[in-house]
Image: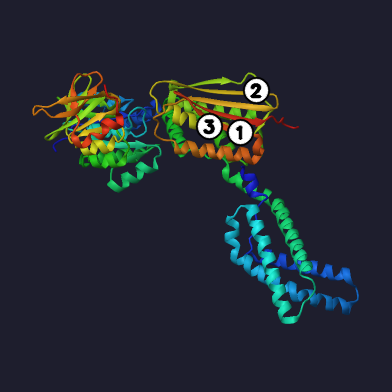
Amino acid sequence: MAAEAPLRVLVVDDEAPARNRLRDLLADCALKLPLEIAGEAATGRQALDMLPVCEADVVLLDIRMPDMDGIETAQHIQKLDDPPVVIFTTAYDAYALKAFEVHAIDYLLKPIRLSRLFDALARARSFAPLRPEVLREMKPDARSHLSVNERGRIHLIPVTDILFLKAELKYVTVRTAEREFLLEESLAKLEQEFFGRFVRVHRNCLVARDAIRGFERAVDAEGEGHWVVLLTNVAEKIDVSRRQQHVVRELGRIL
Amino acid sequence: MSINQNANAGALPNFRNLGILLRILVIVDGMCLAAALLKTTEPMVLMEELIDVSSIVQPILILSLLALAAANNWLHRLRYWRAIAALIALELLLTTAVYYSSAYLLGAPGSFARYAVFTLLITGVLIGYFDLRGRALSPALTEARLQALQARIRPHFLFNSINAVLSLMRQEPRRAEQALEDLADLFRVLMADNRQLAPIAREVALAKQYLSIEQLRLGDRLRIEWDIAHMPADALIPPLVLQPLLENAVYHGIEPRSEPGTITIAISREADEMHLTLRNPYRPDGDHHTGNRMALANIRERLALHFDAEAGIKTVANADTYEVRIVIPYLKAGA
């Protein structure tokens, strides 16, 4: 580490006064520590859009935000090629605070003290990156989006848009009405996380209940008959395995 | 059923309490003496009469106290009238047992019916006495309960507000001052003795102060519509009913949305009832609802303590709005 470039900080908070306050405090810190404000975002999604271009080293991330909370935003941030250090900010959140202590994750309590902010920024470069499992554990309920890194940018896929998830070798293919994405996660874990939204029709495939248009008999190459799932919006048909045949009966909209 | 009734009547005394046992002892022996006095005032005869009665009554009394102390927890788990039935059965059983063993050992001490009636009478008197005593004591309990139920503010709100005020300090010191004044007023009311009913106009003023603090943080994401043109300003309501509901509405209805949302508050009088309706935007898949239920249960209980069955609170979840409706009797200040 030679003469260090200034620390670039992205501020993420849905409340304008909270962002103003951080801007004031960062200006104070800048007197003693070389730093620059890389940008401000009001939502997690906005932050994810900004990160690949604003070259932030540190993200000050509010936990309680509408649409996508800070914990989920941090999970998507970890998919960036060179993810910035995340420091959470929160007014009060007993559950998250306990998790932070357990996993030694740095956080700032609002109202934020100048000295605490300064310390956190001064140490920021030495922080270990957040582990996705830990973030998942902190927010056990399902994510609102899945994310993939596409040429350095984070692409968010709303879970409600997903038609099916199919395991293929090392990846899971995520299919929406428009296109497909490759995800580096395990199908079993996804099934657990989004329990109820998807139904397993095959060892390697989860189909969104809402996307099922009906079922149909099909005949494979060996001339054996089996069920297939018909989907809304796409022509693809998904095989139902013999072991999962009961879903046909349960969801039973046979054409 | 309101907690009113639970706290007041319909509860047996604690039979493991020495004071209670002593009361029973004194009352029973007092009634024995009264019964003997009815027969004679001659001291020697009175003495004999007492000893005669006591040979049956005292064993019954002592055994009853022991049995009651032993069965105390079990009796309290029963419904009131079942416990009473069990109590009467127990007393009759003991009377029968003591009467016949005494008749076997010492010869018949008079007719069984006399003792059975005497036992029933004493049991009835004691049950009535403890019931009245329970009623007399319970307002203290009610008060304590009310105090414990006084609405509490979310820590989340406190810290976020202070943060918002801090953010104003440098650029807009005047707005910061105003916000701190509002915050101080709000906390003054929160920490005051809130057991008495308060004029609804004061509640509305407080709610407006609270909302102006929230507006500071949320800006135009928070929109408020007041429909209170026909509200009688002197109507009385329990303090801090409106503010916690608004806090809920902001927390669950406005904060989880990035687009603006409107909270509507309508207050009106209909005949001798006051109707309060609060509506906020709502998404059925909202994640946090435990805090909501707690605030609602708290308000429901406080309404019951003040008005018993005359007040009601109801929640309605529509497709995209959440509504809380409160009905309380119309009481005028100073009436």
Q: Can residue B177 be seen in this view?
A: no
**Amino acid identity at mark 3:** Leu
Above or below, A54 relative to A132:
above
Pointer 2 or 1: first along the chain: 2
Question: In x, y percent, where is residue B109?
Answer: 78, 76
Q: In this view, does B166 lie above or below B53?
A: above
Residue A241, position in %: x, y?
18, 33
- Say which mark, if any, is on residue B231: 2
Under mark 2, the amino acid is Met
Circles 3, 1 touching at the beta carbon (< 8 Å): no
| Disc 3 target residue | B245
Q: Report which residue position mark 1 lands on.
A: B312
Circle 1: residue type: Gly
- Letter of the chain that mark 3 sits on in the rendering: B
Secondary structure under tag 1 reads strand
Q: Position of residue B221 (x, y in %)?
A: 43, 22
Q: Is mark 2 on a helix, strand or loop?
A: loop
Q: Residue A163 carries which label?
A: none
| Residue in the picture at 72% in, 55% down | B133
Give the Cα distance between marks 2 and 1.
Answer: 18 Å
Task: Give the label, 2 or 1, closer to the camera.
Answer: 1
Mark 2 vs mark 3, CA separation in Å: 18 Å
Q: Do the dots labelled 2 and 1 sit on one chain?
A: yes
Of mark 3 and mark 1, the one earlier in the sequence is 3
Q: Which chain carries label 1?
A: B
Name the quarter where the N terminus of chain B is drawn.
top right
Residue B322 shown left or right of residue A148 in the figure: right
Number of residues whose C-alpha sits closer than 10 Å to that of mark 3, classed few (under 14), some (14–19) or many (20 or more): some
